[in-house]
Amino acid sequence: MLMLHQHITRALLALFLGTLLLSGIVSYVTIKDNNLERYQHELATHIELIKYELEKIDDKEAFANAFKEKTGFRLTLIREDGEVVAESDYNVDEMNNHAHREEILKSQNAPYGYAIRFSDTLKSNFLYVANRFELGGKIYYLRLASNISGIMHNFYALWVKITLIFTVSILLGLYGAYNLSQKIRQEIDKIIINLQQIADKDYRITITSHFSLEFFEIANFLKKLAAKLEKRARQKRKYTAKIKLISQQRSDVISAISHEFKNPIASIMGYAQTLMDDGDANAQIRERFLGKIIQNGQKISSMIDRLTLATKFENGDFTTQNTNFDIGKLTHEIVQTFKEKNKGRNLICSVPEVSITADRTMMEIVITNLIDNALKYSQDNVEVRIDEGVLHVKDSGVGIKAEEIEKVTQKFYRTNSHTWDNSMGLGLALVCYILKLHNTALDIQSTFGEGSDFSFKLPSKNIIL
C-alpha cells in the first residue's frame, strides 16, 4: 500500500505526463496547420506577383530557374491542356502531362488549388499551390511548390523547443510535488505522534500547523479531543477515587460494627449461657446477669441508632425540627444525668439560662457526645460553660496531637492509643453533622498531654434570661 505522499507524487506525475502528451498533440497539429497555412499564403502571394512579370518575360524557363535560385520555391508553368511550358527543377521535355494533378483540378473551381503530395519527378513531398490565369489570350496554370521537408524541419525544430520547455516544467513540477509530499509527510507525522500520545493517555499535546487550512483544522480538532479526553480522565479518576472511598467506608463500617458489637454480644451470650447452664442460680445472681444482658443490649441499640443517624445525615435525609427552648436548662439536665452515671467524677456546669431556636433533640445529642467524649479522655474535672454565645466543653485529659485534630471528626476514626466501648468513632462526626444543619461548626482547641476544649457557637440569636 502506497503512502499519501507517494499517491500525490504519482498523481502529479500522471497529470504532468498527460498534460505533456495532450499539449504535444495539440501543439503539433496546430503548429503544423499554421505553418502550412502560412506557406500557402506566401506561395499565393508570390503567384500574384509572378503573373504580372510573366507578361514581360520571353524566356519563361530562365525566369523559372532564376526564381528558384532566389526564393527556393519550385516554379512550374502549365498550359491549359496540361503540357508543362517552364519548370525550375526538371527538364520539361521529360515531364508528364499535368492536367489531372490535384492542385490543377482544384484551381479550376477556386482562386487557388492546394495539395500536399509526393512528387514522382523529384521523389519528395511538396506543398503545391496553383492558380489559373490568362496570359497572351491563352489559359495557363502557374504553380509554385515548397519542399515539405524544409517546412517540417522548421516545425520540428520549434516543436522540440516546446517539448524541452514542457520537460523542464515537468521536472520542476515533480520537484515541487516532492517537496509538497515531504511537507505533507511531516504534517502527517506530527498528527501520528500526537495520536500515539493520546493513545498512551498523555493529553498534553502541543500540535500546531500553518501549512494549510485542512491541517490547521485537524490540529485544532486534536487539541479539543485531547482536552475532552483529559477532562474525562480526570472525571474517571475522581469517580474511581470516590468508589474506592465508598468501598473503604463500607469496610470501615463492617470493621467497626464487627469490633464494637463483639464485646456486648459476647457478654450477652456469656450471661445467657450461664443462666441456661445453672438453672438453680439464686434470684440475686439471675437479676444481676439479666441486668447485664439488658445493659449490653442497650449498648447495641445505641450503636445502631448512632449509625442510622449518621447515615441519614450523610445522605441528606434528615431535617431539623426547630423550636425555641432553654439550652442552659437542657445542659444542666444532661450534666446531672452524667453525674448520676459517673459518681466520683467532678462535672462543673456554668451555664446560664439561654433561649435559642434549634432542634432540641439534636442539640441534646451534641452536648451529650461532647461531655461523654471529655469524660472518656480525661480523669480530671470536666467543665461546661457558655461564654459570649459559645458553648465550651473543656477537659484536662490527654489532649489530641496536632496532626490528629482534623481527623477526630471523621467517621469511624479513633486514636490508636485510646479506645472505648460503644464509640464506633461516630460521636464527633454526628456532632459536626448536626452543627452544620444549624449553620454553625465545632471548634477544637487541644494541647497534647494537657487537655482539650470543644466548643461551638450557639446556632441562632440567643437571649440570656
Image: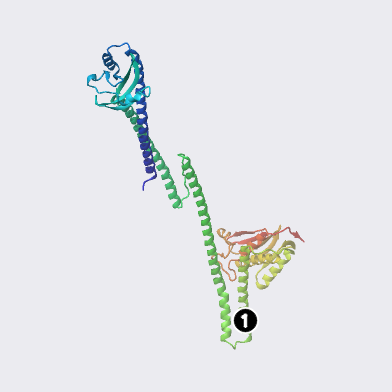
Q: Residue at x 50, y 52 (%)?
A: 229
* Residue 89 rendering spot, x and y as whole percentages: 25, 20
Residue 189 is situated, as x and y percent measured from the top left of the image, at: 41, 45
Query: Residue at the location (29% across, 28% down)?
Result: 117
- Residue 226 lies, in percent from the top left, at 49, 49
Relative depth, front residue between 69 and 257: 69
- Describe residue 185's horizontal placement relative to residue 289 as left or right: left
In the orientation shown, which residue stands out farthest toward the right?
A: 465
Determine which residue is flagged by label 1: 290
Task: Mark yes or no: residue 175 visible.
Answer: no
Pick the front one: 126 or 343: 126
Q: Is residue 418 left or right of residue 33?
A: right
Query: What amino acid type should be assigned to the residue bearing mark 1?
Result: Leu
Question: Left or right: where does residue 397 sit relative to residue 330?
Answer: left
Q: Count the marks: how many? A: 1
Badge 1 marks a residue whose secondary structure is: helix
